[in-house]
Image: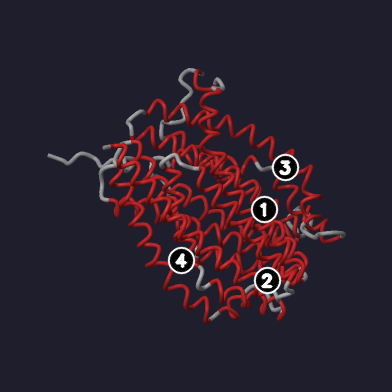
Amino acid sequence: MTAPALDKTDLTSRPISEVIRQVAIPSSVGFFFHTMFNVVDTWWAGRIDTHAQAALALSLPVFFIITALASGIGTGSTALMGSALGAKDRDRAALTAVQMLSFGIFVSAFLAWFGLTFSPAIFGWLGAEGQYLETCLAYMNPIFACNVSTVAIYLFNAVLQSQGDTASLRNVLCFTAALNVVLDPWFIHGGFGLPAMGLAGVAWATVVLQSLGAVYLAFKARRTGLIKTARGRNLIPRPRIYAEIAHQGFPAALNSMTIALGFFVIFRFVSGFGPEASAAYGIATRIDQIVLMPTIGLSVAALTITAQNFGAGKIDRVRENLRRNLIYGAYLLLPLSVPIFLFAEPLMRIFTQDPAVVAVGAGYLRIDAFTLYGYVAIFVPTSVLQGMKRPLFAIWLGLSRQVAAPLLLFTLFTQVLDYPITALWFSIFAIVWISAVIALWFARRTIRKAEAEKG
């Protein structure tokens, strides 16, 4: 007599450590290749010139506007679909999935209009002008015009992630990262019928690869059975469902947007130290992304596992999910602090030979080495809260951490006291750790209240 097949889409009964591995490992591997995708972009931009590399770095927070909205809607919808699946209400999960996709069409149209209209003003505010501004726009205009491919990836992945499938996105990110190694130099320098496009070629390579990834994820999401129209009934826009998606998704999007705003604030002050400083910070953040990959995977696991177990009323598993993810984060991140500190300059030299850029970036990385685990202690608790349908805390923490505190401290240290750029890096260190303590306290408090309400 054979044992019944294991349902890997159900995250409410198997050991927490097992489901964390199921969700977090593919997600972390995928985001490693996503980061490698960005690293390849940065490396090839550096082969053009320092200004192209600085333009790519300056474009990062602008690009983040797209990913913040798309990932926010995906995160909020994952919480809604996961909760419905945990409660064994598959029809409601399917309705949410289809409504999310139609909602995403409106978001994509808004992003295209917003980006093409306001990018020049945004880059101008960040300090770009003349040829520097033109280079920034050459990269971002194709990204904004074709942002539907980016949005589609996040939304189709939300359908899969709500059921514990992070392997499909991993496959997309691995595939596109590998192809990007070929497409970047081809699109930059031209050949085989393509004209040389410079930095704009990096953008068009991204658009092509994300479109391919969106098609694959659409196919995989369709096979789950959640993308069903119910003979067209699910296609009718439901203001109530839109409101639920917005209620969960926009706070998550705004939380992600605060990261973009934080980049705006940092680049506003960093650019005052010259293009070399902007290029250095852009490279250093790429290195950060590589090191923080486990944080992304653990955050995805914290959200997905919490959503299903909260929907099932299993608050004890939500608490265990938080605890386990924090422990795994310590195992993964703390050992990486040492090589980041010791090899800061060699790491920077992988991407640039400009001594001024290397010096500034290495200074950031040495301080950042002691900041890394603080990000785990922020992202995991806020993901748990989003899975519990408590997304608003992340907004207030994000606005405080990414905007209010940096504006206050950066202005004080660099414009009033006239300290060097190192003061920015120490400010980031202090802000991250204070925010981590607050996030942990609030998440544990929220779980205790949910346990008390359950009785």
In front of the other: label 1 or label 4? 4
Amino acid at dot 1:
Ala
- Crowding around mark 4 (Cα neighbors within 10 Å: few <14, some 14 to 19, many 20+) is many
In front of the other: label 2 or label 4? 4
- Mark 1 residue element: helix
In terms of sequence position, does the residue under pointer 2 or pointer 1 come before the other?
A: 1
One can see residue 220 in this view: no
In front of the other: label 2 or label 3? 2
In terms of sequence position, does the residue under pointer 2 or pointer 4 come before the other?
A: 2
Q: Which quadrant holds residue 1?
A: top left
Q: Which residue is mark 2?
A: 280
In terms of sequence position, does the residue under pointer 2 or pointer 3 come before the other?
A: 3
What is the spatial separation of the Cα atoms under label 4 and label 3, in whole angstroms? 37 Å
What is the spatial separation of the Cα atoms under label 2 and label 4, in whole angstroms? 22 Å
Q: Residue furthest right?
A: 130
- Mark 3 residue element: helix
Q: Which residue is mark 4?
A: 373
In front of the other: label 2 or label 1? 2
The residue that appears at 70% across and 67% down in the rendered structure is 412
One can see residue 373 in this view: yes
What is the spatial separation of the Cα atoms under label 3 and label 1, in whole angstroms? 14 Å
- Crowding around mark 3 (Cα neighbors within 10 Å: few <14, some 14 to 19, many 20+) is some
The residue that appears at 32% across and 50% down in the rendered structure is 319
Amino acid at dot 2:
Ala
- Crowding around mark 1 (Cα neighbors within 10 Å: few <14, some 14 to 19, many 20+) is many
In front of the other: label 4 or label 3? 4
Q: Which residue is mark 1?
A: 205
Q: Which residue is mark 3?
A: 145
